[in-house]
Amino acid sequence: MFAKTVILLLLAAIVVALFSGAYFLLKDKASNDNRRTMKALTWRVSLQVGLIVFLIVAYFMGWIQPHNLQGR
């Protein structure tokens, strides 16, 4: 249950960072200073890398298992 909670929290944070980046991109349209957009998108990429690393670690630790597709 711990791994699923962490995965859901990371996915939610990735979506929030993505939409905040889109908001800043649209709001700061007139200025050439897009630091807030870049910061939000950097957070999104960092969270996504963290999610991938967590998924790999969780798989090797046995916290999550892939579905059995041999029965099809």
Image (tube, helix red, strand yellow):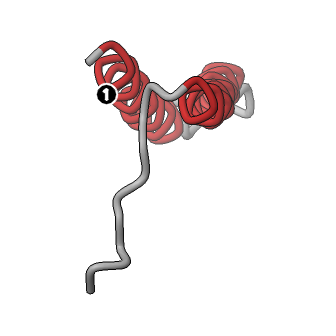
Q: Residue at x 33, y 13 (%)?
A: 2
User: Is 22 positioned to the left or the right of 37 in the image?
Assistant: left
Asked whether 60 or 37 is in front, the reply is 60
Q: Residue at x 67, y 30 (%)?
A: 53
User: Which secondary structure lies at badge 1?
Assistant: helix
Residue occupying the far bottom of the picture: 72
- The C terminus: image quadrant: bottom left
- The quadrant where residue 28 appears: top right
Question: Whole-percent x and y of residue 8?
Answer: 31, 27
Asked if residue 22 is positioned above or below residue 42 in the image, the reply reads below
Asked if residue 64 is positioned above or below residue 69 in the image, the reply reads above
Q: Residue at x 61, y 29 (%)?
A: 37
Residue to which mark 1 is pinned: 8
How packed mark 1 is, by other alpha carbons closer than 10 Å (few <14, some 14-19, many 20 or more), is few
User: Is 18 positioned to the left or the right of 41 in the image?
Assistant: left
Residue occupying the far front of the picture: 71
Q: Please state which amino acid type lies under the numbered disc 1.
A: Leu
User: Is 51 positioned to the left or the right of 42 in the image?
Assistant: left
Question: Whole-percent x and y of residue 49?
Answer: 68, 33
